[in-house]
Amino acid sequence: MMISSVKPFQLMLGKIIGVGGVGLTQLAIRPSSSPQIATVVNLVFGFDSASMDMASMPPPRLDRKRWVLISQGFAELKKQNWWAILPLFIFYFLGLPAILLLFAAVGSAMSDDMGEGQALTIPGHHPVITAFYIMFVTVEAPNSSLAVWSSIFPLFSPIVMPARLAFQPAIWQVVLSVVLLIGHLFFVWISARIYRVGILMYGKKVSLKELKWMFYKE
């Protein structure tokens, strides 16, 4: 019933927005449920710690050294460039659709065979897994050739570039990464066309010959 009521592109876009909303909800819930959020707010926004209750004050003797170390750690956090968080959301909103569109195109072209479905999802998993491994290398060597070019490559940049942002990469690298990622969203159109062919042939394997239908007008 839903397929007959909306266009394939609208159906696919709705699924992508839904999955993206779930990710944003998780990002919002986890920090807010942390007991340390009050301390962070106090340090970032400059609330008067003297006005807080006694439970939030440091113990007088035994834990004084530990409290000093924690205070120094938060003081260093206040010196960081918090504006760098903004690019994280940019890469999230641009990178997540690119990855989900890849899975949507592959998923719509598979049949009911579960073994075949698992094999076809490999092209979607490999870029994500590879990007995570490169991210660990990036933390150790943020200016290496592997880290630099992986942070620019559209399939890896949503994961690798946020890790490099902590090491203040060149502005042109960040801009080029965003531009290529936006250009990579051209696959929105291609994925929507493949998705349309796949859902209209539900239960039947889509061949390369039949994928030519993706260029036909609706």
Image (tube, rainbow, N blue to C red):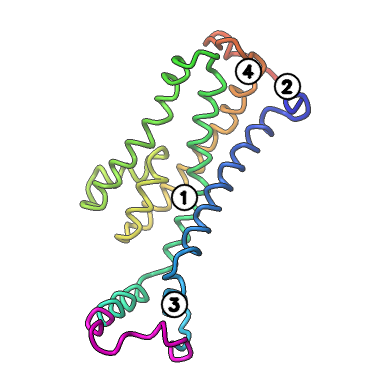
Q: Give the range drawn in magenta.
A: 49-67
**Is residue 175 placed above or below 58 in the rendered structure?**
above
Instruction: Give the distance between the C-alpha atoms of the residues marked 4 and 1, in whole angstroms.
Output: 29 Å
Instruction: Give the distance between the C-alpha atoms of the residues marked 2 and 4, in whole angstroms.
Output: 11 Å
Q: Is the C-beta separation of discs 3 and 1 under 8 Å?
A: no
Q: What residue sits 48% from the left and 43% below the top?
A: 95
Q: Position of residue 172 (x, y in %)?
A: 38, 54
Under circle 3, the secondary element is helix
Find disc 2 in the rendering and name its residue: 218
Find disc 4 in the rendering and name its residue: 197
Instruction: Give the distance between the C-alpha atoms of the residues marked 3 and 2, in whole angstroms.
Output: 53 Å
Foreground mark, 4 or 3? Answer: 3
Under circle 1, the secondary element is helix
Instruction: Give the distance between the C-alpha atoms of the residues marked 4 and 3, in whole angstroms.
Output: 51 Å
Find disc 1 in the rendering and name its residue: 91
**Is residue 2 placed above or below 153 in the rendered structure?**
above
Task: Please report whichever mark, 3 or 2, sits nearer to the chain's N-terminal start.
Answer: 3
Find disc 3 in the rendering and name its residue: 44
Foreground mark, 2 or 4? Answer: 4
